[in-house]
Amino acid sequence: MLQKDFFPFFGIAVWNSYVVYRKNGGKNTQLEFRLNLIDRVIEKYHSGLNFHRGRPGSKPNPEIDRHFLEIIANTDKKTETCKTMRGVLLEKK
């Protein structure tokens, strides 16, 4: 919905600013004007923000945030570790 509503008006605003620029004695072509406008907007408003979509979070620290397998002690009802855990435990030996 934003694209349908916002971007046509933004294009008209850029065109109007180009017309005013030319009437005030500007010599650049429309393409050069638009490229200069893009450069200035990036210089002014780019603050190194993260533009990734999705849930915000921090990058994992490999020294701290590792997931280690834990050995679960046997109980009265369960006398063996599960098969996948057993396979991992055998590989570590």
Image (tube, rainbow, N blue to C red):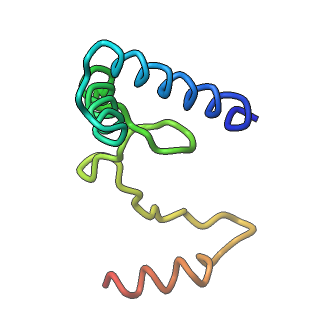
Residue at 47%, 26% (x, y): give it.
14
In the rendered image, the quadrant that contains the N terminus is: top right
In the rendered view, tell whether residue 66 sits above or below residue 27: below
The one nearer the camera, 58 or 16, is: 16
The one nearer the camera, 27 or 41, is: 27
The one nearer the camera, 35 or 79, is: 35
Residue 74 relative to residue 44: left or right: right
Residue at 54%, 63% (x, y): give it.
72
In the rendered view, tell whether residue 66 sits above or below residue 10: below
In the rendered view, tell whether residue 76 sits above or below residue 34: below
In the rendered image, the quadrant that contains the C terminus is: bottom left
Percent position of residue 21, x then y: 34, 18
The total of numbered circles placed on residues is 0
In the rendered view, tell whether residue 67 sits above or below residue 17: below
Percent position of residue 56, x then y: 50, 36
For residue 46, what is the image quadrant?
top left
Percent position of residue 90, x then y: 41, 87
The one nearer the camera, 67 or 69, is: 67
Percent position of residue 81, x then y: 59, 76
Residue 5 relative to residue 39: left or right: right
For residue 91, what is the image quadrant?
bottom left
Residue at 28%, 39% (x, y): give it.
32
Residue at 35%, 44% (x, y): give it.
59
Residue lying farthest to the top in this orientation: 24
